[in-house]
Amino acid sequence: MNRTKANYYVDLILTLLFIMVLITGLVMYLLIPGGVRHGRYQEYLGLTKASWTLTHNRSAILMTAMVGLHLALHKKWIVCATRNILTRNNNKKCELADQE
């Protein structure tokens, strides 16, 4: 698999995980009351509070791992861009083009 396809799939999975974390977080914040006795066993939109929490937490952990992979895939670009921004000698610039 070439680098462009790998970046595409990592970014696609990262986007889907972000949407999942966003939706589950909003549902838990807006719809599920806190401090309710036996609240983790009550159902909200067909899932228990414990299921919403589990889905949210697992998605967030996977999203964090995918962000790490995303940063690893863009390591050259990050180093080069940082070097270009921080160096005062503008004659020696890194090449920012993504090479496969």
Image (cartoon, grey):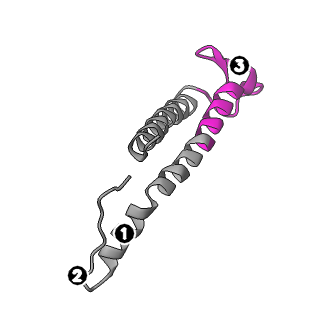
Q: Earlier in the sequence, mark 2 or mark 1?
A: 1
| Residue in view at x 38 percent, y 44 percent | 4
> Which residue is the site of mark 1?
80
Residue 96 spot, x, y in % from top left? 30, 63
| Residue in view at x 54 percent, y 45 percent | 66
Q: Earlier in the sequence, mark 1 or mark 3?
A: 3
As displayed, is residue 42 above or below residue 75? above
The disc labelled 2 sits on which kind of residue?
Answer: Asn
| Residue in view at x 46 percent, y 61 percent | 75
Residue 42: assigned label: 3
Residue 44 spot, x, y in % from top left? 61, 18
Residue 47: assigned label: none
> Which residue is the site of mark 2?
90
As displayed, is residue 93 above or below residue 14? below
Q: Residue furthest bottom?
A: 89
Q: Earlier in the sequence, mark 2 or mark 3?
A: 3
Q: Secondary structure at mark 1?
A: helix
| Residue in view at x 34 percent, y 68 percent | 81
Q: Nearer the viewer, mark 2 or mark 3?
A: 2
The answer for how far apart the CA atoms under marks 2 and 3 are is 62 Å
Q: Quadrant of residue 35?
A: top right
The disc labelled 3 sits on which kind of residue?
Answer: Gln
Magenta residues (range)? 32-61
